[in-house]
Image (cartoon, grey):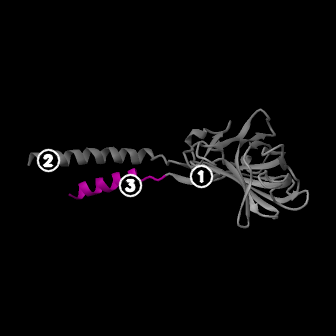
């Protein structure tokens, strides 16, 4: 009976290995106050978020994501940020907040040491759910805003030349924190009723997160195999008794 209980506990522990959500990468601007982010109010309800500038990019340490670089060479690594995202949906207000929804596009971070290498590429957009897609939100007239998207409400996909992003599971997300938001007349605001946000410039930082399934160590797998054999033998003995 004790062996049976031990085996059951071990198997339960292995089966309950939970996917863990972690922030695996982040960036900050080389010059924090430089306005490298731009939202442009185009004709009708069309709007475009762009960014181009120099950043310090880091892969997070201690994430346990297989293959992810976490040495000193990948901390505050000089890189170039490029963003191109579009929306054709009008902005709206909700209480004191203003929201620009349904953005889709790409965030590309390339390595300055070798510009042909992609440190991280994030592709995002609507998932098919009405109103889904990345959004820009903040207080009306404020100088701070967030640009975010997360699975499964939106689609978010990661790619890197430096690690296998297929280990990252469904709860993928990114978040850009914009500061110093400056439009023509004020901070964050809607251009006019039924329109996009007013054009603005800003600086910012960013984080990227996802969940991954921990991989059992070989010793744990061997113990699990022994536990299965023990359970099988005990079951057979009970049947033959």
Q: Residue furthest front?
A: 193
Find numbered disc 3 in the image and state the secondary structure of the residue it sits on.
Answer: helix
User: For mark 3, what is the residue?
Assistant: 13
Q: Residue furthest right?
A: 184
Find numbered disc 2 in the image and state the secondary structure of the residue it sits on.
Answer: helix
Please indicate whether residue 218 sits to the left or right of residue 118 in the image: left
Picture quarter containing residue 124?
A: top right
Q: Are marks 1 and 3 in contact (CB under 8 Å)?
A: no
In front of the other: 94 or 80: 94
- Percent position (x, y) of residue 166? 57, 39
Mark 1 surroundings: few (<14), some (14-19) or many (≥20) residues within 10 A: some
| Residue at the (80%, 53%) spot, across then down | 197
Find numbered disc 1 in the image and state the secondary structure of the residue it sits on.
Answer: loop
| Residue at the (26%, 57%) spot, across then down | 5
In front of the other: 112 or 168: 168
Q: Residue furthest left?
A: 241
User: In the drawing, what numbered circle is on residue 237?
Assistant: 2
User: In the drawing, what numbered circle is on residue 63?
Assistant: 1
83 magenta-colored: no
């Amino acid at each position: 009976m004790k062996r049976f209980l031990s085996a059951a506990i071990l198997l339960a522990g292995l089966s309950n290995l939970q996917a863990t959500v972690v922030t695996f990468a982040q960036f900050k601007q080389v010059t924090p106050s430089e306005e490298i982010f731009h939202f442009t109010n185009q004709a009708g309800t069309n709007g475009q978020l762009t960014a181009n500038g120099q950043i310090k990019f880091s892969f997070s340490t201690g994430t346990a994501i297989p293959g992810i670089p976490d040495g000193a060479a990948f901390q505050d690594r000089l890189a170039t940020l490029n963003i191109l995202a579009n929306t054709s949906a009008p902005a709206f207000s909700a209480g004191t907040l203003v929201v620009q929804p349904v953005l889709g596009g790409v965030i590309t971070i390339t390595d300055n040491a070798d510009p042909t290498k992609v440190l991280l590429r994030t592709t995002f957009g609507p998932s098919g759910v009405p109103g889904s897609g990345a959004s820009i939100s903040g207080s009306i007239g404020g100088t701070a805003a967030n640009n975010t998207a997360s699975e499964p409400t939106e689609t978010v996909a990661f790619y890197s030349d430096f690690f296998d992003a297929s280990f990252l599971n469904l709860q993928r997300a990114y978040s850009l924190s914009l500061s110093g938001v400056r439009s023509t007349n004020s901070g964050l605001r809607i251009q006019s009723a039924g329109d996009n946000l007013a054009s603005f410039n800003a600086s910012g930082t960013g984080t990227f997160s996802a969940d991954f399934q921990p991989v059992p160590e070989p010793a744990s797998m061997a113990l699990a195999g022994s536990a299965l054999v023990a359970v099988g033998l005990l079951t057979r003995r009970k049947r033959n008794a």
